[in-house]
Amino acid sequence: MHDNHVANRSAAAARRFPGWMMAGIGASLVLMLSAIWVVTTRSEPAARATAPAARATAPAEHPPGSGGAPAEVPAAAADDGALPDDREITPFDTRHTAVARLDKRLLKAVQEAARDARDDGIEFVVTSGWRSKEHQQRLLEEGIEKYGSLEKAREFVNTPEKSTHVSGKAVDIGPTDADDWLIRNGSAYGLCQVYANEMWHFELLTSPGGTCPGPLNNAAG
Ligand SMILES: [Zn+2]
């Protein structure tokens, strides 16, 4: 009944204002189509945008020409502590989990050191920080491939169980002049070089102003 009433009224209106009605219907159609277009295409650019990011987080060890990182790199890879290799990340870039998930005391010490180093014209770059277990396992497997055996790889890469990167208690700093600065001045912040064969790897191993223990030969030691 009500519908009929409305239909009758619309029909009457259409008879009275056919041009106006047509314009109205046309405008509604355009609006509807626009809305459909927005809804169907909206998620696409976002999906496309994440693809290069996922590729950028692929480890640098992938040899060029191997086809690069496969497109099926899981989205979660962006959150496993891998850092982009096309940008320099500072100790203040806390939007990266590699930095944000560092032990709070370690992060504070590195930031303080970075500020003071900057006064000496030295810029700290975080080349690695917190890593997920999966990320660490991947690095170990890549190390085994690179060095030919687990034993040799373990001189440079720890297991996920032992890695202080996984627990957020280690940070790798570059470039070399920053490492030199930190090896010389790190103990003032409690920061120490841990392994003789890794001048870039630092942990809080003393109290600020204390003395760093002598570095171990390597990650296996
Ligand atoms: Zn390290």
Image (cartoon, rainbow, N blue to C red):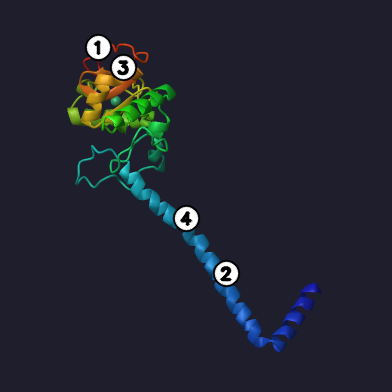
Q: Looking at the figure, which quarter contains the C terminus?
A: top left
Which numbered disc flags the more N-terminal residue, 4 or 3? 4
Q: Are marks 3 and 1 in contact (CB under 8 Å)?
A: no
**Which one is in front in this view, the residue at disc 2 or the one at disc 1?**
1
**Which one is in front in this view, the residue at disc 1 or the one at disc 4?**
1
Which numbered disc flags the more N-terminal residue, 2 or 1? 2
**Which one is in front in this view, the residue at disc 3 or the one at disc 2?**
3
Q: Considering the numbered disc 3 on the image, is that residue within a helix, a strand or a loop? A: helix
Q: Are marks 3 and 2 in contact (CB under 8 Å)?
A: no
Q: Which residue is mark 3?
A: 187
Q: Which residue is mark 1?
A: 214
Q: Which residue is mark 2?
A: 32
- 182 vs 88, nearest the viewer: 182
Q: Considering the numbered disc 4 on the image, is that residue within a helix, a strand or a loop? A: helix
Cα–Cα span, label 3 and label 2: 66 Å
Question: In which quarter of the view is residue 57 placed?
Answer: top left
Cα–Cα span, label 3 and label 1: 12 Å
Q: Amino acid at mark 3?
A: Ser
Queried on whether the Cβ of the residue with tag 3 lies below 8 angstroms from ligand 1, the answer reads: no
Which numbered disc flags the more N-terminal residue, 1 or 4? 4
Q: Amino acid at mark 2?
A: Met
Which numbered disc flags the more N-terminal residue, 3 or 1? 3
Queried on whether the Cβ of the residue with tag 1 lies below 8 angstroms from ligand 1, the answer reads: no
Question: In which quarter of the view is residue 194 placed?
Answer: top left
Q: Considering the numbered disc 2 on the image, is that residue within a helix, a strand or a loop? A: helix
Q: Looking at the figure, which quarter contains the N terminus?
A: bottom right
Q: Residue at x 25, y 46 (%)?
A: 68
Q: Are marks 4 and 2 in contact (CB under 8 Å)?
A: no
- 4 vs 157, nearest the viewer: 157
Residue 156, visible in the rendered structure: no
Q: Amino acid at mark 1?
A: Gly
Q: Which residue is mark 4?
A: 43
